[in-house]
Image: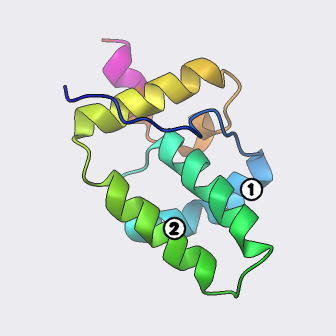
C-alpha cells in the first residue's frame, strides 16, 4: 500500500441531509463510493456553494474526484477506514460502499 495521503480534512463530517443531497452528484464522478471522499469533498463543496456561482461547487467536486481516483483501491479503502474510525457515527454507513466494511472485517 502506498503512503497515506495527508488529508487535513479527514475529520470533516457531514450530516445525513447533506450526504443525501450530494450523494447523487458524487456518483456522477466516481465509479464507486468512498465514504471519506464523500465527506471531505462534499463538505468543501457546501462551504464553497455559499460564496460562489452555481457551477463552481461542481467544478470543485470534479477536481476532488479526479485527484482521489489517482489513489489505488487499497489507499481509498484506507482513507475511508481511517475516516470511519474518527467518525464512528458516520451516516455514510448507510450510503457508502458496503465493500469497504467487508474489506476490513475479513
Q: Is residue 91 above or below residue 43?
A: above
SS state under label 2: helix
On the image, the x and y values in percent for residue 98 come to 44, 35
Image: magenta residue range: 101-105
Answer few, some or many: residues within 10 Å of disc 2's Cα (few below 14, many 20 plus, some between 14 and 19): many
On the image, the x and y values in percent for residue 43 come to 67, 54
Q: Is residue 85 above or below residue 64?
A: above
Q: How is the image coloured?
A: rainbow
Using the rendered view, name the quadrant where residue 14 is placed: top right
Q: Is residue 73 above or below residue 62?
A: above
Instruction: Give me the residue at 45% from left, 61% from top.
Output: 64
Instruction: Give me the residue at 56% from left, 18% from top.
Output: 85
On the image, the x and y values in percent for residue 66 come to 34, 64
Is 6 situated left or right of 86 in this image?
A: left
Nearer the observer: mark 2 or 1; the answer is 2
| Front-lying residue, 74 or 59 | 59
Instruction: Give me the residue at 29% from left, 55% from top.
Output: 69
Instruction: Give me the residue at 73% from left, 74% from top.
Output: 49
Which residue is identified by label 1? 18
Q: CA distance from mark 2 to mark 1?
A: 14 Å
Answer few, some or many: residues within 10 Å of disc 1's Cα (few below 14, many 20 plus, some between 14 and 19): some
Which residue is identified by label 2? 61
Is 25 situated left or right of 52 in this image?
A: left
Amino acid at each position: 500500500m502506498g503512503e497515506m495521503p495527508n488529508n487535513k480534512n479527514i475529520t470533516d463530517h457531514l450530516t445525513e441531509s447533506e450526504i443525501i443531497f450530494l450523494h447523487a452528484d458524487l456518483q456522477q464522478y466516481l465509479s464507486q463510493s468512498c465514504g471519506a471522499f464523500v465527506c471531505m469533498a462534499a463538505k468543501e463543496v457546501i462551504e464553497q456553494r455559499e460564496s460562489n456561482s452555481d457551477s463552481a461547487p461542481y467544478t470543485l467536486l470534479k477536481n476532488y474526484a479526479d485527484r482521489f481516483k489517482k489513489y489505488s483501491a487499497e489507499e481509498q479503502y484506507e482513507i475511508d477506514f481511517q475516516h470511519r474510525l474518527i467518525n464512528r457515527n458516520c451516516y455514510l454507513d448507510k450510503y457508502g460502499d458496503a465493500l469497504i466494511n467487508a474489506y476490513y472485517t475479513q
